[in-house]
Amino acid sequence: MASSIPPLRPAIDRTSSKPSPAREPLWRHALGECLRGLRHERGEKLSETARRAGVSPQYLSEMERGLKEPSSEMIAAVAGALDVTLVDLTLAVAESVRSAQSSASRGVTCSAAYALAA
């Protein structure tokens, strides 16, 4: 039984002279930015939020910097410590990714328009 599987394409075409499109941010980076923003809005120190969430300040710092892929339990614990629901946090992160993606695509369009105008 032969199946028709298309050949794999390289992730990066190093022979192309076209610039690659802007990458959308990783979820963990957008999550970290949202968590840090919420904590700053509350005027809290890292150690205060971490203590309430039951995580170490170092771990929370790594989450905020996008260095960790936290489990759903860790995300829920930090969200609870910041008095936000998991749903609201998820929507905020999704909106952050969406706005970053649309900003990047607008930037490419504007750059192309300026190049054509010149």
Image: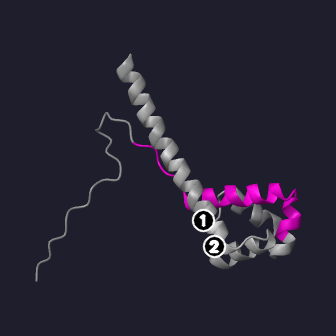
Q: Quadrant of the C terminus?
A: top left
CA gap between label 1 and label 2 equals: 6 Å
Q: Which residue is more in the foreground, 23 or 92?
A: 92
> Which corner quadrant of the image does residue 94 belong to?
bottom right
Q: In this view, does 105 lie to the left or right of 97?
A: left
Q: In this view, does 12 lie above or below 114?
A: below
Q: What residue type is labelled 2?
A: Val
Q: Which residue is more in the foreground, 40 or 12?
A: 40
Q: Are marks 1 and 2 in contact (CB under 8 Å)?
A: yes
Residue 75: percent from left, percent from top: 68, 72
Reply yes or no: does residue 34 show up in magenta.
yes
Q: Quadrant of the N terminus?
A: bottom left
Residue positioned most to the bottom? 1
Identify the residue at image location x=48%, y=36%: 107
Q: Is residue 1 left or right of residue 47?
A: left
Reply yes or no: does residue 117 show up in magenta.
no
Q: Residue 87 carries which label?
A: 2
Magenta segment range? 21-50
Secondary element type, mark 2: helix
Identify the residue at image location x=76%, y=64%: 60
Residue 45: percent from left, percent from top: 88, 59
Q: Is residue 65 left or right of residue 95?
A: right
> Which corner quadrant of the image does residue 4 belong to?
bottom left
Q: In this view, does 44 lie above or below 88?
A: above
Q: Residues within 10 Å of mark 1 (few under 14, many from 20)?
A: few
Secondary element type, mark 1: helix
Q: In this view, does 54 lie above or below 61?
A: below
Residue 31: percent from left, percent from top: 64, 61
User: Which residue position holds label 1?
Assistant: 91
Identify the residue at image location x=39%, y=29%: 112
Q: How crowded is mark 2: few (under 14 residues within 10 Å), some or many (20 or more)?
A: few
Q: Could you tell me what secondary structure mostly forms the magenta stretch?
A: helix
